[in-house]
Amino acid sequence: MPAPGDDAAAWALRHPLDAAGERALEAWLASDPRNAGALLRAMAALTVVDRVIMDDAETPPHPAPATRWSSRRGLLIGMTGAIAASVAGLIGWRQFAADHVTTARGEIRRLPFADGSVATIDSDSALRVVLASEQRWIALDRGQAWFQVAKDRSRPFVVDAGIAQARAVGTAFSVERRDDGVEVAVTEGQVAVWPSAASGMMTILHAGQYARFRSSDAAPVTGTAPAAIERALAWRGGEIALENETVAAAVARFNRYNHRQLVVDDAELAQERLIGLFQIDRPEDFAASLAASFPVAVTSGPDTIRLGRKKSPPS
């Protein structure tokens, strides 16, 4: 049987909880009188992690692997320090009224928060915001957002993206939630990330690094790619930046923002590679550029712009 500290480390990282999770946590707390104290110690250790994130953000950049704290079992169970949160703070965030924010297709919104943080929200996204006294919570239900987080040591900023969680104090980072997984990318400072159902597993990402999650109980794939991250976030300025992407990938990105959809009718054309910078709301310019670079026939209609290979004239 695992020691109380082992399970406490997992519970401290599994927040925010849904209704079933809250019931399971209450049952675990009731099962052993030692559990409440173990959980409080684990949560106190998380405040030390927040301090590390903040302290790193305030020192000059230095080389550091993305998995600096990837083994968290000893960190969470062994640390001592002032307890800065309570069990109620862990399980009770859903009692607060959340602000629901959605964006339509093609809409990009800049949303200031009362704490001084700002979210830039991508097309077709949905999130819920709770700014409580001890934590700042964002539940990203779908889509993508880039967060500029105001520094507040007493209130960590947590983004719940379903299978993955991200925790920051003062930094800038994006979270993208799609059907095939979650990606967190850091543009400034440091962010702690972990799979939602993992036990004692955490990764610290620095500026220019990313983490890709495919499940809620496995470590993410991490890497360093500052230029690629900036290109991927060009949507914040209403642009799509392509650097050796396929036509198929470029078309998928344009179609996220426009009601008039691009359609590729040729499989070989779909795999051609592109470089360029385009306006998000100008798919016809993209089609014209493609026709100027490849033997492409463009057929425009009210709802679609079809792209196919030009047919050779009969000999």
Image (cartoon, grey):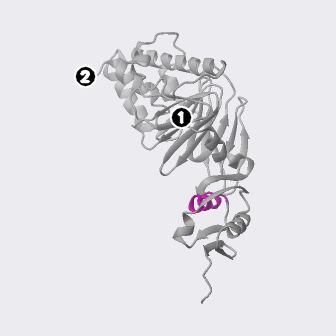
Image-quadrant location for residue 184: top right
User: Is 175 drawn above or below residue 155 in the view shown?
Assistant: below
Residue 306 percent across, percent down from the top left: 63, 73
Tell me the element at label 1. Answer: helix
Q: Residue at x 65, y 29 (%)?
A: 171
Q: Is residue 220 magenta?
A: no
User: Hey, which quadrant is residue 39 in on the image?
Assistant: top left
Question: In the rendered image, which residue does mark 1 sit on?
Answer: 94
- Front residue of 19/84: it is 84
* Residue at screen point 69% across, 49% down: 235
Q: Nearer the viewer, residue 187 or 48?
A: 187
Q: Main secondary structure of the magenta part?
A: helix
Secondary structure, mark 2, is loop
Q: Residue furthest left?
A: 1
Query: In the visual, does 206 lie left or right of 179?
Result: right
Mark 2 and mark 1 lie on one chain; the one further toward the N terminus is: 2
Q: Few, some or many C-alpha atoms within 10 Å of disc 2 (few <14, some 14-19, many ≥20)?
A: few
Residue 204 lies, with reference to residue 55, above or below; the image says below
- 3D distance between C-alphas at marks 2 and 1: 31 Å
* Mark identifier at residue 1: 2
Specify whether 161 is left or right of 21: right
Of all residues, the one furthest to the bottom in this rendering is 315
**Residue type (three-letter) at the residue carrying disc 2:** Met
Q: Is residue 254 within the magenta segment?
A: yes
Quadrant occupied by the N terminus: top left
Image location of residue 51, percent across then percent down: 58, 17
Q: Residue furthest top?
A: 81
Residue occupying image coordinates x 54% and y 15% = 84
Q: Are marks 2 and 1 in contact (CB under 8 Å)?
A: no
The magenta span reads 246-257
- Quadrant of the drawing holding the C terminus: bottom right
